[in-house]
Image (cartoon, rainbow, N blue to C red):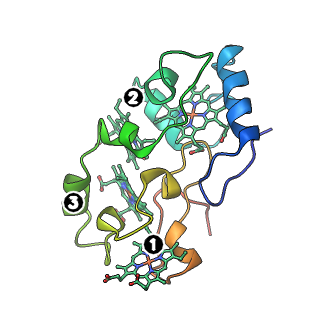
Amino acid sequence: MRPFFPQGEPTMQSKRLLALVLATGLLAFGAAHAADFGSDRHVARGVQCQTCHGPDLKNPVWPEEKVCLGCHNRDDIAAKTASKLNPNPHKAPHNGDCTLCHMQHEPEVDYCAQCHQFNFQMPNGKKQ
Ligand code: HEC
Ligand code: HEC
Ligand code: HEC
Ligand code: HEC
């Protein structure tokens, strides 16, 4: 039911799935999974589906980075993680889009690992 997007790129199929799930009001989507994904943690803090997917559930928005940046400040995160991450993906010269790594309905991934060996340990990634 839920395709995995290693590139973080929405496909037509997944956009349709998103529209379907949201339009049919299957709002327990997040709760249906035992695993603690980003969306679960956000919902637990009172963030609604609509906050990330837009108010029109019949025409849902695929969350882009600016949705995340509405609440998170890139410079603050870079400062906070400066001692741990070098180079810092929160200051990446490319591919720094939040949702490439911090997936919200899947385990998080180190997107940079396709090409680099920085070995970032994603806080909520797959258990090794
Ligand atoms: C490499 C992929 C990657 C990308 C892209 C990325 N992050 Fe991160 N992020 C990480 C890693 C790794 C950590 C864990 C740092 C640590 O060990 O504490 C982290 C930590 C965080 C934290 C927790 C910081 C703290 O210690 O309190 C937040 C919040 C966060 N990222 C948000 C974002 C946002 C927002 C974006 C987009 C602007 C983003 N990240 C882009 C890899 C990434
Ligand atoms: C409505 C505000 C809001 C939006 C939108 C939002 N976040 Fe968050 N996020 C939070 C809050 C609040 C926390 C908890 C902060 C803390 O504990 O310091 C958090 C925590 C996080 C964390 C670290 C802790 C954890 O539990 O994973 C990451 C990573 C993160 N958000 C990434 C994202 C990404 C990626 C997006 C965009 C898809 C996003 N956030 C959108 C409010 C938001
Ligand atoms: C913090 C932001 C955030 C919240 C809250 C959130 N989502 Fe998402 N959602 C995303 C992102 C980012 C994607 C892109 C794929 C991914 O990261 O897993 C996505 C993708 C989806 C998809 C496409 C299928 C998939 O798994 O890729 C569906 C369906 C979906 N969300 C439903 C929901 C529902 C229902 C809720 C409320 C329970 C919700 N989302 C809450 C950010 C969020
Ligand atoms: C598709 C492959 C690919 C991905 C994915 C990728 N990179 Fe790169 N990166 C490169 C290549 C090729 C270079 C060397 C050429 C250049 O400098 O543009 C490079 C160079 C860099 C440099 C040195 C550039 C400079 O100007 O100092 C940094 C830092 C870097 N990448 C960080 C990252 C981070 C962080 C991520 C993940 C958020 C990432 N890259 C994802 C291919 C990639």
What x and y, as percent, mark residue 61? 53, 29
The residue wearing badge 1 is: 120
Residue at (62, 70) in percent of width and height:
128
- Mark 3 or mark 2: which comes first in sequence? 2
Indicate the secondary structure of the residue bearing disc 3.
Answer: helix
Residue at (40, 23) in percent of width and height:
46
* 10 Å crowding of disc 1: few (<14), some (14-19), many (20+): some
Disc number placed over residue 80 in the picture, else none: 3
The relative height of residue 24 versus residue 40 in the rendered view (above or below) is above
66 or 123, which lies in front?
66
Q: Say what amino acid the circle numbered 3 marks.
A: Lys
Residue at (56, 43) in percent of width and height:
37
Indicate the secondary structure of the residue bearing disc 1.
Answer: loop
Q: Say what amino acid the circle numbered 1 marks.
A: Phe
45 or 7, which lies in front?
7
Check if mark 1's residue and mark 3's residue have beta carbons within 8 Å: no
Is the residue at mark 2 in contact range of ligand 2, meaning its CB lies under 8 Å from it? yes
Disc number placed over residue 45 in the picture, else none: 2
Residue at (36, 67) in percent of width and height:
89
* 10 Å crowding of disc 3: few (<14), some (14-19), many (20+): few
Q: Say what amino acid the circle numbered 2 marks.
A: Arg
Q: Which quarter shows the N terminus?
A: top right
Please state the quadrant of the image where ligand 1 appears.
bottom left
Viewer can see residue 124: no
Label 2, label 1: how far apart the Cα atoms are: 26 Å
The relative height of residue 71 versus residue 112 in the rendered view (above or below) is above
